[in-house]
Amino acid sequence: MGKNKLQKFAENETFSNLLQPASEEVFRKDHPIKGEWNRTFFKNSNPIVLELGCGKGEYTINLAKRHPDKNFIGVDIKGARLWKGAKEATENSMANVGFIRMRIEHITSFFSKDEVSEIWITFPDPQARKSEIKKRLSSSRFLSLYQRFTKQNAQVHLKTDSQGLHEYTKALIEQNDLRVHVCTNDLYGSGIADDILSIRTFYENMFLEQGKPITYIKFELDNQKILNEPELE
């Protein structure tokens, strides 16, 4: 492991806005912060928004700058990536930003019923093989986890360069009759890229340089429904 990465890991331990639980703390058990984010972490009653697979936290940070009336939490397993977002939030005294280093499979250990108002999924691993579909962050498996802690009709945003993941998510939404607000397979060609949708992550800039169009879907998660996988070829 490189010296620079070790330095980042050491500095991560000093950030009060970054939680790094050990696996045994969250495997089939609840973390003490569950249900307590507003009261003990943010110390306000503002809505909570998650960025899943947040990488360096670009969306988490930039959304928080634009919406001081909301609280934002970035989730990722890579500590060296999270370091950037946690450091920027610390240096700028951003009280409405937090990060968790963990596998998203453990997400329900951290959030209680109705605790989260909105979810962003930005450039996740597309998990292209059929055998890996259940690992997609927009799969019925993961959406069912989100149903356990989101408010009814919470908005979910998926922004990705993967046309395959985009089409799969569209099919899942149609299969389960979920309400769609926006859907485009070419965000910047569509003319709808506003101040929020124009936030660009490290990976997004890389994909744009490669000439890949960016896709975007915003839909509502109905917590009353049992979600089913779409029938795909």
Image (cartoon, grey):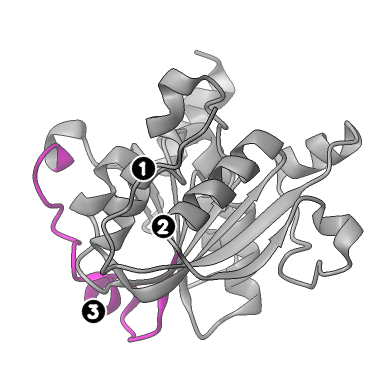
Q: Does the magenta stretch include residue 30?
A: yes
Badges 2 and 3: C-beta atoms under 8 Å apart? no
Crowd around label 3: few <14 · some 14–19 · many ≥20 (10 Å): few
Q: Where is residue 221 in the image (x, y as percent from the top left)?
A: 40, 66
- Residue with the most extreme left position: 29
Secondary structure mostly seen in the magenta stretch: loop
Q: Mark 2 points at which residue?
A: 176
Q: Earlier in the sequence, mark 1 or mark 3?
A: 1
* Foreground pick, 146 / 134: 134
Q: How far apart are marks 1 and 3 (CA)?
A: 23 Å
- Frontmost residue, 154 versus 198: 154
Percent coordinates x, y for residue 198 in the rendering = 79, 62
Which residue: 56% across, 41% down? 168
Of 35 and 175, the residue lying toward us: 175
Magenta highlight range: 26-49
Residue 39's mark? 3
Q: Which three-letter amino acid code belongs to the residue tagged 3?
A: Arg
Question: Which residue sits at x=55%, y=82%?
Answer: 68
Measured in 3D between alpha carbons, the distance from the residue under mark 2 to the one under mark 3, in whole angstroms, is: 35 Å
Q: First in sequence: mark 2 or mark 1?
A: 1
- Mark number, residue 13: 1
Residue located at (48% from left, 22% from top)? 130
Q: Between residue 44 and residue 221, name the one nearer to us.
A: 221
Q: Can residue 134 be seen in this view?
A: yes
* Placement of 135 over or under 65, stated as above or below: above
Q: Is residue 163 above or below residue 87?
A: above
Q: Which amino acid does label 2 sit on?
A: Asn
Tell me the element at label 3: helix
